[in-house]
Amino acid sequence: MKDNGIKISGLSLELNGKRILRDISFDVAPGEFFCVIGSNGAGKSTLLKCVAGIMGGYKGEISVCGRNVSGLSARDRSRLVAYVPQGFPNDIPYTVRDFLELSRYPWRGVASGADDEREITEAMDITGVTAFSGRRLSSLSGGERQKVMIASAIAQGTDAILMDEPTTYLDYARQMETMDMMSRINSLRGVSMMIVTHDINLAAELSGTVAAMSAGRADWVGPPSVLFDTARLAEIFGVPFRKYVADGPGERRILAPERSVL
């Protein structure tokens, strides 16, 4: 397997005199589906922006595909890693197709027009946006725009994809679609995927490894089975959790916060 992993070593970041990230070290294995969980303000999104090269000024080292991201130009970095942010502006004056064509910019002068067409077509097929490729982004629903953002990341043709809360603001049906889509991308493309999420059931079901963050630290990194240690979840999120077994064939465990009885 090609070295498309992500390595983070001794990552610390201070902004305006406040420590945001504190000595974080872990690896995302090549081709792995890796989830980062934690409460609000834990530093998850900031961590992802550092890996994407959007945020600098940190101490430590981050490498993607064996290359130190801090030493790369924006264009070279964009050939290695794609970033899907949380939220998406609805006033971008492009059609879906035009927007996906923009995602091929890092390869301009390197890839052929046939390569661009293949990547865009496959990205639209995987994410199911082909039917509205001629529509303007401003006319799409929130779920449709999220699909386009993910399609853009696929069309970018990178070996690693970062996503910040990809199921936020989506209804349950769209959440399930997005989860299935991310799983397909991971298996079809063999890309390394690093996902920030509040959805611990998504992390338990799809990830190969989970990192749990609080107060800017990676408190523990391990297999998703660790999530079913409800005492650890309570430490991370500050509320008690319970395990449930879903009805139906086979056993599917579900995690949910436990309400106090007043």
Image (tube, rainbow, N blue to C red):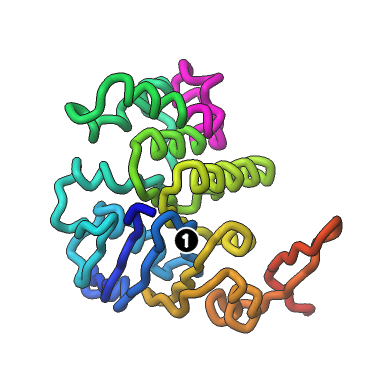
Q: Nearer the viewer, residue 91 or 174?
A: 174
User: Dividing the image into 4 quarters, which one contains the C terminus?
Assistant: bottom right
- The single residue placed furthest to the front in the displayed view is 1
The stretch of residues the image draws in magenta is 124-145
Residue type for callout 1: Phe
Residue 160's place in the image compared with 232, above or below, is above
Q: Residue at x 33, y 60 (%)?
A: 6
Q: Is residue 111 left or right of residue 155?
A: left
Q: Residue at left 23%, top 68%?
A: 15
What residue is rendered at 28% in x and 75% in y? Answer: 19
Tag 1 residue:
34
Farthest-out residue, top: 134
| Residue at screen point 30% across, 28% down | 102
* Relative to 206, residue 140 above or below: above
Disc 1 crowd rating (10 Å Cα; few below 14, some 14-19, many 20+) is many
Q: Is residue 24 above or below residue 141?
A: below
Query: Within the magenta stretch, is there residue 260?
Result: no
Residue 16 visible, this angle: no
